[in-house]
Amino acid sequence: RPPRSTLSSSSAASDVYKRQLVKGTVLENYEFVADEPHMLKEALLSDASKITQTADSGAEPSGTVPVDHSFNVKGVGAVVLGVVADGVIQKHVTLNVLPGTKTTQARSIQKHDDEFDTAYQGDRVGLALKNVKVDDVERGTVLTSDSSVKTSKQIRARASLVKYWSAPLKEGMVVHVGHWMQVLNSKIESVSNEPDWRNPEITLTLEKEIVHRPGDTAVLMYLEGGKLRVAGTVKLP
């Protein structure tokens, strides 16, 4: 469900005003709750409980961590920082290192400098890894035990341009595709603007493989666009 907004809700008129303020933005479908610390704490604990219950349901756990930082620790080896984007990461689990064909294991899991055996979706973690070097897990690398996570170097999909974008996309344009911690240079090979140029079907060739789950949304950026850099989004195959 949409995330909660922490904007206070003092009256019905105030709620209507707030809805008008966020109409047409990513906040439009957020849930409004009272700005009460106790209520927020209970709601967040309830959400966290649902995540752990799902993760501990008995199914084989899998999870994904996009790497945002990596470094070497003397006597330990390669350590990465990131947020669990989906699922569960367990200690000693084998993780695919994408893009590429290497695998690694989580030697240890830390959250806020404490050791844990398991990390859940939304947790910020530090993972000490086996059998890889720092250069193998640079920013943008994805560690995953989820078999549905894939890589693509060419994308053919339907894009959705933001309402402030003023012109159709064109063949030959160089755009950047952002997903998780990857921001990749790419070229538009073909564009079909029918029936609506704001929702064109495009073919992109990327400088290197992008890591994603089927159906994930990536951001399209055009860095030559002046003040407006974000052109829209594209659904990854």
Image: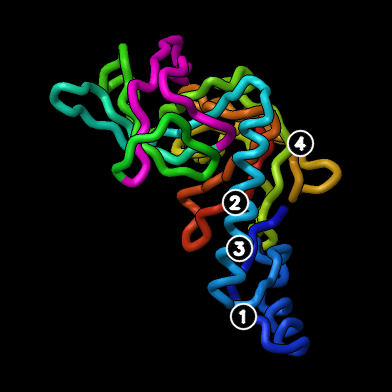
The answer to the question of whether label 4 and label 1 lie on touching residues, with beta carbons closer than 8 A, is no
The residue carrying pointer 2 sits among few (fewer than 14), some (14 to 19) or many (20 or more) residues within 10 Å by Cα, namely many
| Left or right: 192, with 154 as reference point | right
Disc 1 residue type (three-letter)? Ser
Element assignment for label 4: strand
Which mark is on residue 32?
none
Residue plotted at (58% across, 33% down):
87
* Distance Cα–Cα, label 4 vs label 1: 45 Å
Give whichever of discs 4 and 1 has the lower sequence position: 1
| 42 lies above or below 133 | below
- Magenta span covers which residues? 86-112
Q: Which residue is most to the right?
A: 195
Label 2 amino acid?
Ala
Amino acid identity at mark 3: Glu
Q: Earlier in the sequence, mark 2 or mark 3?
A: 3
Q: Say above or below: 23 vs 210.
A: below
Q: Give neighbour class at mark 3: few <14, some 14-19, many 20+ (Cα, 10 Å).
A: few
Distance Cα–Cα, label 2 vs label 1: 32 Å
Give the residue drawn at x 69%, y 64%. Answer: 30
Question: Is residue 138 placed above or below 193 in the rendered structure?
Answer: above
Q: Residues within 10 Å of mark 1 (few under 14, many from 20)?
A: some
Mark 2 or mark 1: whose residue is earlier in sequence: 1
Q: Which residue is mark 4?
A: 192
Q: Nearer the viewer, mark 2 or mark 1?
A: 1
